[in-house]
Amino acid sequence: MSRLILDGILMGYSALFRVAFVLVAFLMTGAGCFVSPISVARVQEAVEKVVQTPVRQEEPLLWRDVGQGIGRLELTVSTSTAARMVLYRFPQEGFSWRFAHATSSQRVSAWADQSPRAVLVANGVYFHPDNAPSGMLLSRGKRVGLRQFDLDRTSAMVLAPGKPRIIDTKTESLDIASLTEAAQSYPLLVEQGQARVQEESGKYARRTFFGTDTIGNVYLGVVPDEPVSLFELSQMLLKTQVDWMRVINLDGGPSTGVVLRTSVFDEAIDSYTGVPNVILVEKK
């Protein structure tokens, strides 16, 4: 009787589901077990759910054109909180990237007001209480300060000449004498599409980061509201659907700030405190 019931149920399903039902029937009737109508109904219900439920495709995130070839993406990701990320994408060509430094600090919005040619101004790298950079910093070909992080464990960001890129100084050589715009920061958040931060530190802050993808686009992003850990940030970056080459963390916390000004779009996410060095992006 159980075989007849199963044959009736199997009509109209594909060959794949026929095989599945036969296996279920074998397991349920083996050793003389009785297959009740309730058991068969549950199997049928499970199969119908598989048949009727469409495969969910990951919908592409919507990038907004904010002028001059710049894209803007905003998304909120569930971490320990619901954290908002704002990400700006620049094409490889058409923009110049450089650092600016001063012996005194001021908020990112003030830096932007003093840099009318800049399309984007963002906080830069770590600094000491004397406002000198904590690691190596070169601006317009000149070394700023004397401090330097160990090259065998700290990553570096090179903005010019040529296309902006990130160098892992632990595995790649860095010819400091040939550089005009460069700075040290850490840690690497993502490399070749994989998260580099593997452990939760429990330290939360606003965040700023710089990155490149596999086709040469350059990115500057912030998590400006809800504080996140570096581990959470690395996971957030994987949800942007960007094919990342590398992403590096910049100074964050109260220093986090970015101002974007194009002919059609303005946005200011100001730092809570003054910063002595910033990244400037100008249209060539």
Image (cartoon, rainbow, N blue to C red):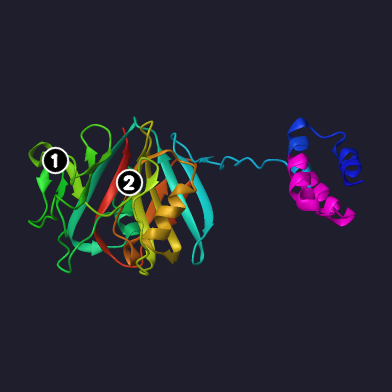
Image vertical order of residue 180 relative to residue 136, above or below: above
Looking at the rendered structure, the kind of residue marked 2 is Pro
Residue drawn at 90 percent across, 44 percent down: 5
Q: Nearer the viewer, residue 69 or 210?
A: 210
**Within 10 Å of the Cα at label 2, are there few (<14), some (14-19), or many (20+) other Cα atoms?**
few
Residue 246 x %, y %: 33, 43
- State the separation of the CA atoms marked 1 and 2: 32 Å
Position in image of residue 97 (x %, y %): 27, 40
**What secondary structure prevails in the magenta region?**
helix
Q: Quick one: label 1 or label 2, which is nearer the N terminus?
A: 2
SS for dot 2:
loop
Classify 111 as above or below 1.
below
Residue drawn 40% across and 50% down?
Answer: 221
Is 213 drawn above or below residue 127 in the view shown?
above
Question: Quarter-wise, where is residue 224 in the image?
Answer: bottom left
Q: Position of residue 132 (x, y in %)?
A: 14, 61
The magenta segment: 20-48
Numbered tag placed on residue 198 in the rendering: none
- Residue 284 magenta-drawn? no
- Give the labeled residue for mark 2: 116
